[in-house]
Image: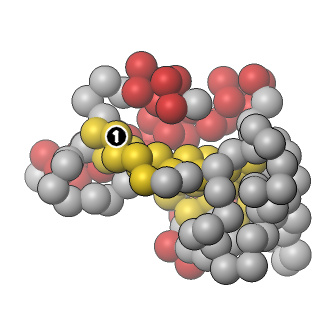
Amino acid sequence: MIRLITEAHPDAVLARLDGAAFFSLDDKHWPNFATIVWTDEHDDGAPSNLSARDGVFRVNLAVDPGTFHSLVGSQADPDYAALDTFVPHPAYAKQRLISILNPSHATLRDQLMPMIKAGHDRLAARRNR
């Protein structure tokens, strides 16, 4: 996943911390356009159950209000541990972040990568203003 994002966005700045990778366009200011986590240490209560499942990772990204509401806005009790399912971010849904665990190839191609590109482009436009 890290390679896919960096190849699609060669201008991305990648920061790695234990259990997480953050993608931005500026190494001094860190609004992220995507993050990947493979540990529960940053979550309250481990809702994605990442640490107990080898190879499971979560991609997080901010989306526009329309995308947020159409994908996850009606989820009253999301299953944060479900694979290949968009859910509101377990901690940052109020900031319109969504998450997905281990997206399938079709979800990655048809939905996730276009949303990552949109997030990248929004951040690039904001940076260029």
In the image, residue 94 lies at what x, y percent? 56, 78
Q: How is the protein colored in the picture? A: secondary structure
Q: Residue at x 87, y 75 (%)?
A: 77
> Dot 1: few (<14), some (14–19), or many (≥20) neighbours within 10 Å?
some
Residue 50 seen from this side: yes
Residue 86 seen from this side: no
Q: How many labels does the image show?
A: 1
Residue type pointed to by label 1: Leu
Would residue 31 be found to the left or right of residue 78 on screen? left
Viewer-nearest residue: 33 or 72:
33
Dot 1: element: strand
In this rendering, the answer to whether 95 lies above or below 109 is below
Residue extending farthest top: 7
Q: Which residue is drawn at 34% across and 46% down?
A: 15
Viewer-nearest residue: 31 or 56:
56
Would residue 15 be found to the left or right of residue 82 on screen? left
Viewer-nearest residue: 40 or 121:
40
Q: Residue at x 68, y 30 (%)?
A: 108
The quarter of the image holding the N terminus is: top right
In the image, residue 92 lies at what x, y percent? 56, 73
In the image, residue 54 lies at what x, y percent? 80, 42
In this rendering, the answer to whether 101 lies above or below 3 is below
In this rendering, the answer to whether 9 lies above or below 73 is above
Viewer-nearest residue: 58 or 73:
58
In the image, residue 65 lies at what x, y percent? 54, 64
Dot 1 corresponds to which residue?
14
Q: Which residue is drawn at 34% across and 40% down?
A: 14
